[in-house]
Amino acid sequence: MHSITFLGTGGGRFVLLSQRRYTGGIWFDLGVNMIIDPGPGALIRALQFGRNPSKLNAVFVSHRHLDHYNDAELMIEAMTHGLKKTGILVINKNTLDYISEYHRNSISVIIPDIGEKFRIHDLEIQAIPTIRHENGIGFKFFTEEEIITYSSDTDYSPELIRYYKDSKILILNVISPDSKKTDKHLNTEKAIKIVKRVRPELTIIQHFGMRMLNANPNLEAMEITRETGVRTIAARDGMTIDLRDLEISEVDGQKRLFDF
Ligand SMILES: [Zn+2]
């Protein structure tokens, strides 16, 4: 079963430091196992939510902020099992120097240009742009059945639409609610502009900042659904989406801790 599991849905400094929502990134199982943006707690949340880090094939880092790269070395260590196994690191240009030489040398590194397509085993992936956000990159995954797009942190620009189009699932990092002013991130108003034009089958919003959590991400997701007619949900920590039928399930993290 192909699936996506949210190891954390928090974003920004204050949520990161309070862990009001976790910051472990997103686990993609598309036949290839990948962790995207392993922020603080990625390893412990993977274990808590029943994902086995030694099964990882690749670690993805979109940009050089702590809530996106902090646990990258740890996940590389878990992926390579103390150098007994190989693995791949996909990372944007200006973040590679944050990764120790020891860890860089233990894996293959892919530093894609914007728009560039590359493969991990049979899976095709494209690096897509972000706007006004540390020269970061987003990722678009092409499986035989579906296209899944992860925006990473970005501001809005019409330029993004052509990169997001044809997505069955669009994952947007919407850090702020309604029309709250934000220069380097999406708020709900900007997300609506994107979803109206991309029209995926499902939009998932995540990477919530403090104001978003106070506003209630579920209400913001409902607003996006109402304005666009596109099913939109707010991700929760430990939520898994089954890509066959887009059914959602949630792991009781405490019960699953130390399950394997
Ligand atoms: Zn962020």
Image (cartoon, rainbow, N blue to C red):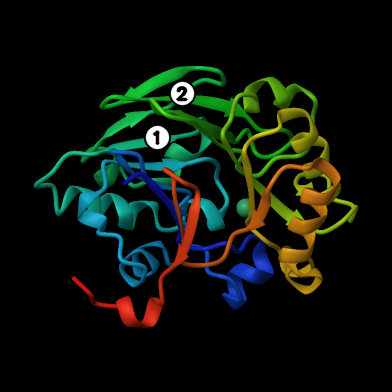
Q: Kindly identify the amino acid type of the residue bearing the numbered disc 2.
A: Pro
Task: Identify the residue under disc 2.
Answer: 112
User: In this rendering, would 185 be left or right of 122?
Assistant: right
The residue at the point 24 percent across, 37 percent down is 107
> Between 196 and 208, which is closer to the camera in this rendering?
196
Quadrant where the C terminus lies? bottom left
Q: Are marks 2 and 1 in contact (CB under 8 Å)?
A: yes
The residue at the point 30 percent across, 78 percent down is 257
Q: Earlier in the sequence, mark 2 or mark 1?
A: 1
Mark 2: few/some/many CA within 10 Å (<14, 14-19, 20+): some
Q: Does the residue labelled 2 lie within 8 Å of ligand 1?
A: no
Please say whether residue 28 is visible from this viewpoint.
Answer: no
On residue 90, the disc is 1
In this rendering, the count of numbered labels is 2
The percent coordinates of residue 188 (x first, y second) are 81, 51
The residue at the point 42 percent across, 41 percent down is 60
Q: Tell me the distance, in whole angstroms, between the alpha carbons under discs 2 and 1.
A: 8 Å
Q: Kindly identify the amino acid type of the residue bearing the numbered disc 1.
A: Val
> Between 17 and 101, which is closer to the camera in this rendering?
17
Task: Name the residue furthest top.
Answer: 116
User: In this rendering, would 236 be left or right of 25?
Assistant: right
Q: Is mark 1 on a helix, strand or loop?
A: strand
Q: Is mark 2 on a helix, strand or loop?
A: loop
Task: Name the residue furthest bottom.
Answer: 254
On residue 253, the disc is none
The percent coordinates of residue 27 (x first, y second) are 40, 51
The percent coordinates of residue 178 (x first, y second) are 87, 56
User: In this rendering, would 24 be left or right of 259?
Assistant: right
The percent coordinates of residue 44 (x first, y second) are 35, 70
Mark 1: few/some/many CA within 10 Å (<14, 14-19, 20+): many
Q: In this view, does 232 lie above or below 115?
A: below
Task: Name the residue furthest left.
Answer: 84
